[in-house]
Image (spheres, helix red, strand yellow):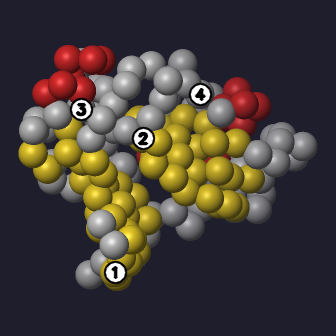
Amino acid sequence: MALKQVGFRVFQTGENVSYGGPGNMPNIRFEINPNLTAAPATTYSSMVWNPAPSPVTDRWSPYLDATTTGTWYLTGNAGTVTGCKLTAQCTFPQLKTTLNDGGTAPTIYTAGVGKGRDHMWIGAVDGLRINRTIYDFESGGVRTRRAG
């Protein structure tokens, strides 16, 4: 899989923590074709990163690196086949290993930042990094820049 760097910075408020605890955080979701040799008919899954709790509250966090922190899972049959599912989440290296089953590399269709349905979350995300591109969300729109 071509995904090597991913993560963001987050403004986590004390109010958000009071709604759902310190793990009440936004996530990153990719719509993918997992291209699994073990399940060739499975052509769609969401690949989701759930970050660990923010190390700070009521201010911007440092960069939260999704390749080294938090957990990942795949939805649907891809999660069942790989074992990286909502009820048994994986690290990023484990996820990459399960998707590298000898066939074609997974295809990423879309990326997004979201929040599950468990607890409300009101905050901000910035500096979304996907590989060598950083997306800065500004009042006038999204500005992209290349990571060093």
Q: Disc 1 or disc 4, which is closer to the eye?
A: 1
Tell me the tag on residue 145. 1
Pick whichever, 49 or 111, lies toward us: 111
Q: CA distance from mark 2 to mark 4?
A: 15 Å
Label 1 crowd (10 A; few <14 / some 14-19 / many >=20): few
Label 4 vs label 3, nearer the camera: 3
For badge 2, the amino acid type reads Asn
Mark 4 is on which residue type? Lys
- Distance from Cα at disc 1 to Cα at disc 4: 33 Å
Name the residue that disc number 2 marks.
27
Q: Earlier in the sequence, mark 1 or mark 4?
A: 4
Secondary structure, mark 3, is: loop
Rendered view: 117 above or below 95: above
Q: Earlier in the sequence, mark 2 or mark 4?
A: 2
Q: Is residue 17 left or right of residue 68?
A: left
Question: In the image, what residue occupies the spot 74% across and 53% down?
Answer: 33
Instruction: Give the residue drawn at x 15%, y 48%.
Output: 61
- Which of 82/120 is in front? 120
Q: Residue 109 sits in which quadrant?
A: bottom right
Mark pair 4, 3: CA separation: 20 Å
